[in-house]
Image (tube, rainbow, N blue to C red):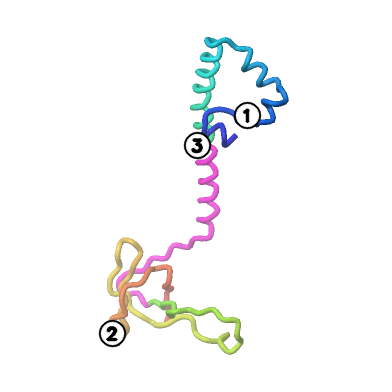
Amino acid sequence: MPYSLVHGVEAILPLEHQIPSLRIAIEEGLSDEDNVCLQLEEFEALDEKRLEAQQRLECYQACICRTFNKKVHPRSFQVGDLVLAVQKPIIVTHRTKNKFVLKWDGPYVVQEAYTNGAYKLVAKEDLRIGTINGKFLKHYYA
């Protein structure tokens, strides 16, 4: 239970104190030494519960990562490649008159490629466009 993972003990409802339950009867009938031993056993079991929760979390994250990476198409460009860039800003409207508006600008030439996936672009007239992330680019085939 999430409560037991956070607090280290099972939750006891106020109703269980008013109407005696088996769990409360067992805990009240224990001596101090037995109660301490029971607490130590629960404390040792808590580490195991945390490890199990951590393993389930890692499995879940790996599954989500695999699912996400199926849709990712890495794009890499070399210096000198011709590319198209997404027009900025792209405003999505539901009007039909904007249906056939071009979404890509270009072609541009990649002047410099950085290690973090960013590229410096230059227009064919040696006009510097600036730095743009690779996910906003696509290859241009003349």
Q: Is residue 10 above or below residue 63?
A: above
* Residue appearing at x 28%, y 71% in the figure: 112
Mark 3 and mark 1: span between their CA atoms?
25 Å
* Residue appearing at x 48%, y 79% in the figure: 90
| Highlighted magenta segment, given as a residue range | 55-82
Which is nearer the eye, 55 or 69? 55
Q: x, y percentage for residue 111?
A: 28, 74
Q: Main secondary structure of the magenta part?
A: helix
Q: Secondary structure at mark 3?
A: helix
Q: Which mark is residue 12?
A: 1
Which is nearer the eye, 130 or 80? 130
Q: Which image quarter is the C terminus in? A: bottom left
Instruction: State the image quarter where residue 130 is shown.
Output: bottom left
Q: x, y percentage for residue 32?
A: 54, 11
Q: Left of 121 or right of it: where is 69?
A: right
Between discs 1 and 2, the one toward the N terminus:
1
Q: Which image quarter is the N terminus in? A: top right
Q: x, y percentage for residue 45?
A: 53, 23
- Evaluate if marks 3 and 1 touch, with contact meaning CB atoms under 8 Å apart: no
Q: Left of 77 or right of it: where is 41?
A: right
Q: Residues within 10 Å of mark 1 (few under 14, many from 20)?
A: few
Q: Secondary structure at mark 2?
A: loop
Question: Which numbered mark, 1 or 2, is in the foreground of this view?
Answer: 1
Q: Which mark is residue 42?
A: none
- Evaluate if marks 2 and 3 touch, with contact meaning CB atoms under 8 Å apart: no
Question: Which numbered mark, 2 or 3, is in the foreground of this view?
Answer: 3
Which is nearer the eye, 68 or 7? 7
Dot 1 amino acid type: Ile
Determine which residue is flagged by label 2: 127
Determine which residue is flagged by label 3: 54
Between discs 2 and 3, the one toward the N terminus:
3
